[in-house]
Image: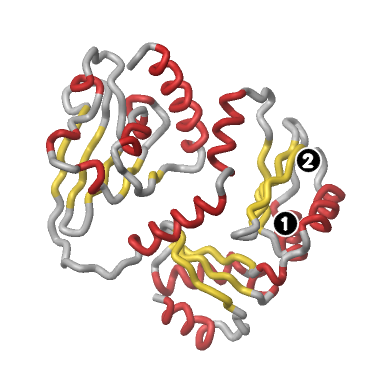
Amino acid sequence: MRHEIARYFSVVNPIESGVTKIEFEGPRIAIYTRNPEVFSNRDQIAKDLVTLIKKRIVIRSDESIRMPKEVFEEEVRRRIKGIQDLIFNDLIGEVIVEIASGVPPPSDDEIKELSASTGWVIRVEMQPPMQTKTVQKANNIIYGYPEERLQALRRIGEKVFRNQVFETTDARITILGSGMQVGRSAILLQTNESKILLDCGFSPSGTKNMEMLPRFDIMEDLISELDAVVITHAHLDHMGIVPYLFKYDYRGPIYCTEPTLPLMLMQQLDFINVAGKEGV
């Protein structure tokens, strides 16, 4: 796969790539470049690469072409109004720009131009009208521990992009919960290559663990052998038991949509707090 990417820059795209490294980061292939032109045109180049290798691509700037953080902060505060906070991730060259609620955000073209001139990937997010401890905890989880997060993404990425061992032609679906009830939604998808769990929910009507949790007991060491968990949406009957997985040795990725992530985290934190007080 790295060979195909190298071929793209040497044959398909005439721009000198300046690629410094290619990393597998979770479900994406991350290409780091020291060429400002490649970084500025990263969206189109990524689209071309996706067409070529049929994988998700992200192009990041090498540290050598990024504007120093102090200079960047001064520049971005001058050009974007209502900034409340800047959250830097030096490891991947991204910065979250939080602006006050109600302040008109900059246009996509303005963000693109500012990103190209500074070497940082810029994401603008609107702060919620009311800050709560739960929101702060969720943000700490989403944006905190960047080194540990990147290490985990690269570990998972090596597994995601591993060479195929078996020719997978069959799949088995097992309902672990919610088949004939509302709650504890969990569907196990198995192939010769992997085990994927679709949703991991809680049943509020249950009075015992066996009634509240999906039937993880159907297979020995099931939780630790899962390759991935996919959450469809942020309702407790679809994602309430996700923290339980990590208690019992699951160390893989949780896939969900971007809007689902903060909603899921806030509900899980609240659920854990309430369950702890009730001795569950």
Q: Quadrant of residue 242?
A: top left
> What percent of the width, then of the height, locates residue 261?
48, 38
- Residue at the (43%, 77%) spot, across then down: 2
> What percent of the width, then of the height, locates residue 105?
74, 42
Q: Disc 2 residue type?
A: Ile
Q: Is residue 187 left or right of residue 49?
A: left
Residue 83 circle label: 2
- Residue at the (48%, 72%) spot, across then down: 49
Q: Quadrant of residue 16?
A: bottom right
Q: Quadrant of residue 85?
A: top right
- Residue at the (41%, 58%) spot, across then down: 27
Q: Is residue 169 above or below residue 187?
A: below
Please state which of residues 73 and 198 is positioned toward the viewer in this rendering. 73
Mark before the other along the chain sequence, 2 or 1: 2
| Quarter of the image with the N terminus in it | bottom left
> What percent of the width, then of the height, locates residue 74?
85, 52
> What percent of the width, then of the height, locates residue 84?
76, 37
Q: Is residue 77 above or below residue 159?
A: above
Q: How many marks?
A: 2
Residue 109 circle label: 1
Query: CA gap, disc 2 to disc 1?
Result: 18 Å
**SS at mark 2 in the image:** strand
**SS at mark 1 in the image:** helix
Please state which of residues 220 and 238 is positioned toward the viewer in this rendering. 220
Q: Disc 1 residue type?
A: Asp
| Quarter of the image with the C terminus in it | top left
